[in-house]
Image (cartoon, rainbow, N blue to C red):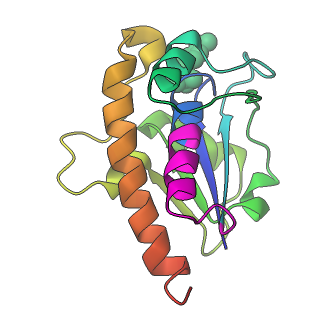
């Protein structure tokens, strides 16, 4: 079993996109019962809101559902509930480390740190850039790398 939390600033654009894409990927590999996936924001402005229209529309075009998803803020207890806490950018990672106490064995990293030869390590924020397609491409690459890592580290004997 592996438990994954994707984190961005508002939990309406990037991290819900990563949550939905990763869940879709994991389900397509028949691993849905072995990997729990959630997302959260470091900020509280959008708590209770559904994903941003840009994220929801793009994912709907790709056949990926965002139904029922609602933004929440990270809480200290998340340190006990997840094995992989995956930040979308460097500031998210700084803020996560302020908000929750890192537990031994919990992987805390930026998503693009997992991608070999990534040209940069921060997933640009489409709330400001408006470029949701760019985020989709980066998040897919990051999620593929994350799934490979989890298979090696946690599901190798499955
Ligand atoms: P996200 O994007 O962190 O990818 O969800 C943002 C959403 C909202 C805000 C900032 C970033 N905001 O300032 O309200």
Residue at far bottom of view:
157
Q: Residue at x 43, y 59 (%)?
A: 146
Quarter of the picture holding the N terminus: bottom right
| Whether residue 16 is situated above or below residue 32 in the rendered picture | above
Front residue of 78 and 62: 62
The answer to if 21 sits in the magenta stretch is: yes
Instruction: Please state the horizontal and vertical placement of residue 89, each as a whole percent of the image.
Output: 43, 37
Instruction: Please state the horizontal and vertical placement of residue 136, each as a whole percent of the image.
Output: 38, 30
Instruction: Please state the horizontal and vertical placement of residue 97, each as a whole percent of the image.
Output: 61, 49
Quarter of the picture holding the C terminus: bottom right
Q: Residue at x 77, y 29 (%)?
A: 68
Q: Quadrant of ligand 1?
A: top right
Image: magenta residue range: 19-34
Q: Residue at x 54, y 23 (%)?
A: 13
Instruction: Please state the horizontal and vertical placement of residue 20, each as a whole percent of the image.
Output: 58, 39
Q: Residue at x 40, y 39 (%)?
A: 139
Name the dominant secondary structure of the magenta segment.
helix
Q: To which quarter of the image does residue 67 belong?
A: top right
């Amino acid at each position: 079993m592996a438990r994954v939390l994707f984190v961005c600033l508002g939990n309406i654009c990037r991290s819900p996109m990563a949550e939905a894409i990763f869940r879709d990927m994991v389900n397509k590999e028949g691993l849905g019962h072995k990997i729990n996936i959630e997302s959260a924001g470091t900020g509280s402005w959008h708590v209770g809101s559904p994903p941003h229209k840009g994220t929801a529309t793009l994912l709907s075009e790709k056949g990926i559902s965002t139904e029922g998803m609602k933004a929440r803020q990270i809480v200290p207890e998340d340190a006990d509930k997840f094995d992989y806490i995956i930040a979308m950018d460097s500031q998210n990672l700084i803020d996560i480390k302020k908000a929750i106490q890192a537990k031994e064995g919990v992987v805390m990293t930026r998503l693009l740190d997992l991608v070999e030869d990534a040209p940069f390590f921060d997933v640009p924020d489409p709330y400001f850039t408006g470029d949701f397609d760019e985020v989709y491409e980066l998040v897919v690459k990051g999620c593929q790398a994350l799934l490979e890592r989890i298979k090696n580290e946690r599901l190798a004997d499955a």
